[in-house]
Image (cartoon, rainbow, N blue to C red):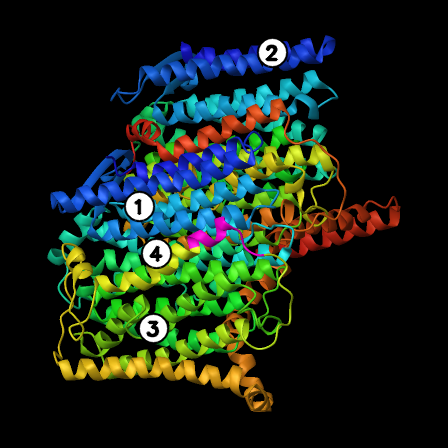
Amino acid sequence: MILLVLILVLFGAALLSWVAGVKSHAASRWIALCSLLVNLGIITGIWLEHTHSNSRWWYQFRMDWVPHFGISLHLAMDGLSMLMLALTFFLGALAVLISWKEIQNRVGFFHFNLLFVLCGITGVFLTMDLFLFYFFWEMMLIPMYFLIGIWGHEHREYAANKFFLFTQAGGLLMLLAILGLYFVHKANTNVYTFNYFELLNTPMTPFMERWLMLGFLIAFLVKLPAVPFHTWLPDAHTEAPTAGSVVLAGLLLKTGAYGILRFVLPLFPIAAADIAPVAMLLGVAGILYGGMLAYAQTDLKRLIAYTSVSHMGFVLLGAFAFNEIAYQGVVMQMITHGISTGALFIIAGALYERIHTRNLRQMGGLWLRLPMMGSAAMIFVMASLGLPGLGNFVAEFLVLLGSWQASHVFTILATIGLVVATAYSLRIMQKVFFGPCDRQYAMPDLNGRELVIIIALVIVICWLGFHPQPVLNTSQNIDYVIR
Amino acid sequence: MFPALIPLIPFISALLLMAGWKRFSRIGVTVTGCGSIGLAAVIAIIIAMQFSANGEQAIVQHAGNWLEAGGFKTGFDFRMDALSVVFVLVITIVGFLIHVYASGYMHDEPDYARFFACMNLFVGAMLTLVMADNLLLLYLGWEGVGLCSYLLIGFWYKDPANGYAARKAFIVTRVGDTAMAIALFMLFQYTGTLSIPGILENSTHVWSVNDGMITVIALLLLGGAVGKSAQLPLQIWLPDAMAGPTPVSALIHAATMVTAGVYLIARTHTLFELAPAAQTITAVIGAVTLILAGFSALVQTDIKRVLAYSTVSQIGYMFLALGCGAWSAAVFHFVTHAFFKALLFMAAGAIIVALHHEQDMFKMGGLKNRLRGVYWVFLIGCASLAAIPFVTAGFYSKDQIIWLSWSAAGGHVGLWLAALLGALLTGMYTFRMFFLVFYGEEKTKVHHQPGNSMMIPLYILAVLSTVAGFIELPHTMGHVTLFSNWLQPVLPAVSVLHESLAMEWTSQALSALLALSGIGLAYAWVVKHPKGMSDFLEMPAIMWLRGYWSRGWDFDELYNVLLVRPFVYLSRINRRDLIDTLYTGLGAFMEWCHNVLARTQSGLLRWYILSVVLGAVAILSVLIWRIYL
């Protein structure tokens, strides 16, 4: 029941903040913030309660929806879902906070969309019914389309359309695969069901398994995104408002990773193992190609966007390594990437509010005026290049350590990606904060609200770097497909 | 006493300085910044004394778990044994002196707190590196050192050249780190742990001598070491690292960073002993580096660049010793080098400040009587670097390496000759610098004298650069083995093949003679016959050679052509992402189709009739063809 509450709180708050937004902007913001904090509190409570639990599924909730077709309202939570939800509510709250001054028109509708996306994401992380999963999967899409298209930067419509077309195309493939699986299961067992647990061990021919797996995999690869399906991401991330970029990078991409871990590997273990070399290749290609693209960018947000392509390559590499160390690294990477990239987007947004440009060529020497923002950027830039002591290092190290057992060549190439990461990461610092200061920008350093956001993020990323054990313990109790 | 306190105190102080940079007064920063390192030094000395009194093998403190996942487990374990004690003492004591000096040198710097925060972080990271009991924690210190070098080399961030040098240092060393990371993966795969004692213990069971896998691992570790220690082929970052403030250079060159590679190899010596091929490569890299860097040092005009190349060259000696299996000789040279190189850098800094930030030696000269105190300490430093016999620490440590490069089990005549050539070069470039700065006519006015906070550390280091040599004397002269005895529990004694007093004498006499003749040549070159010398140096071929050496044998250019430019070029032409054109192309194609088809809807009746007729004809012909043919 508590799981349904998590979704309903967001859904209710979404409607409420829309209505309230008509009268008062502040009310709309506070409603959104409070609902997310309530959910964050619930999740923290759940986590504390289950820190030492070894049970596989912490909560289950099941209610028939369309029994005739085997569709049910089936939610369940294990460690993986819990971690992803904690990230969702944490970043969601920060997204509301960061929009406090940035969003001034149609405030109510903005928060409606924001909460609605988060609601969809929550559903995706919780649902154990494939039909419902598809429902939530699509539900994330439309409000995100509005977020980019209405409150975005200059090329927002192009970016929004591109985002929509890519994810929609992937989603349709997934729908086909879900229906395929549904009918295959019926043919073999004479039961119509969308229930994840019942579908887990559906017997099928290798040929069928491969095609169904591909349907899921491509949808998730588009979302992740993996090369060569990544080209929607830089446009969407760049044009979205800051909150949109944070949600996109921090959360939407994670639904792709989550889908691979939750559906592709357990549902189709044999076909997934067959395609592992290709998937790992795509992962490594993402790491290197994304890094190289990031290095070349002159638009700050676009640069950060491409680093996501690079970092999500580690997820793909680790997910198809089929061993526990790599899986733990993948889960860790999903979280730390959300934090560090989210933070970088927040900094880019704060910078944009001050100098009204994202062009790196028009920045430089800003440390002089913004030492606090510079220090914060330094921390997250270091996180993104994988400095030990910050969370991303733990994640990438575990992924690489695990992948090494699966493939030497791919691991070596991925490790070289760390050098590329150094090159593009340091370029951010140099172009924005160091070098001569040509322009006389007069601007304040981080204000109280921004400081709260940044400090929260810094604490989390350091905590994950020095004491990742709570997360690792939680992610240990997941059913991994291990070879 | 808890060993973990030693790195922790500088970290905490760095955090305080970073968080409260606005609230600290200048004195508060000085006290916090220097005091933390001083406190760490005191604790280190106490632990070292306890350690030697109790006769323990090692003190290990488990300060907490770090991460545990799927059979991989590692924690924050700090280890104090004979080897780390030596490094910790040098890092904290020399580091403390550098901090005190820096409080004078950076006195007028507006970003005073940031400077000391980074310096403390640097020392803390280095201490973590040398005290780590497992390779992952070592890697944390290792990368932390890289970060701090980046922060400090680029400390004066307004000049893009400094930023470039800083990034270069970070990225080049990161290339080495990548190799090391892969070594870590392999070590875990084969030994199932990253704990250093565990690895060393398991290694002898897992691999036999000359096993291919252990050779690869040793070479990868060596890759990490050459990155941090600025050895061939990753030496290029160190000369540019001069961009940072002078105390930073002193810290990088003497106490931290560049000695990390030496430490790593000494710490994992068991692995290298299993891989003689890797050891030989280490020795050869050391020998080649020491000569190449020696030639480069000979032709520099910037005083700090001479010292930078001399560091590369001296670390080359340490690698040579490591490669020959003379572990304690390498560590001994690290100790004396730390003293005299810190001394030289800081004395050079005093000169540079006195001359209004002039670094070109050809614009100095005649400072002998103007900067009396600096003159003497600089002389002592130079003497030690050039290894003047009997009275300097540098002589005893370097002489041991030269002798062992021939006589040790891993030694070779070629290595020995290279080491001797290095001795000649060292004498030449060191005293060329010395004479250029202090003799001849005065070219730039001294505008102020260095204060006490800068001079006192120099005096202390001058004493250390002289007396530190007496803790280890060769067979031929007194045979004191305090230092190698101390290290005995960790580093095995070198196995000497050619035990011959006569040969040892010859080697010592030769190296001393070569060092002295190097000095003589420098004297003739700079002081006696500057005219004749400059004519010689102006010859076209010599000019070219000087340029070539002074550019560091064009390694920068090589990497630019091979790696940097292709990468930058490829990424630049692909800025708009080739793959995206595929999708936009698809979109454009759809639009084209749309346009073509839209044109058919023209409203012209005859056009529609024609299409209908043509269509009908086409369908009919297909039908007829299918049915009748």
Q: Is residue A240 visible?
A: no
- Label 4 with label 2: CB-CB less than 8 Å: no
Q: Nearer the viewer, mark 2 or mark 1?
A: 1
Q: Distance between the Cα atoms at labels 4 and 3?
A: 23 Å
> Which kind of residue does numbered mark 4 sit on?
Ala
Q: Nearer the viewer, mark 1 or mark 3?
A: 3
Nearer the N terminus, badge 1 or badge 3?
1
Q: Please give the residue where the numbered disc 1 appears in the rendered image.
A: B136
**Rendering coords of residue A381 (x, y %):** 52, 43
Q: Please give the residue where the numbered disc 3 appears in the rendered image.
A: B387
Which element is circle 4 on? helix
Q: Nearer the viewer, mark 4 or mark 1?
A: 4
**Rendering coords of residue B330 (x, y %):** 27, 65
Pointer 2: residues within 10 angstroms few (<14), some, or many (20+)? Answer: many
**Quarter containing the N terminus of chain A:** top left
| Residue A109: image tag | none
Q: Is residue B469 visible?
A: yes
- The chain to which mark 2 is attached is A
Q: Nearer the viewer, mark 2 or mark 3?
A: 3
- Label 2 with label 3: CB-CB less than 8 Å: no
When the figure is inspected, residue B134 is found, relative to residue A465, above or below; the finding is: below
- Label 4 with label 1: CB-CB less than 8 Å: no
When the figure is inspected, residue B120 is found, relative to residue A423, above or below; the finding is: above
Which element is circle 2 on? helix
- Residue B485 picture quarter: bottom left
> Which kind of residue does numbered mark 3 sit on?
Ala
Q: Is residue A463 left or right of residue B242?
A: left
What is the span of residues highlighted in magenta in the rendered image?
B449-457
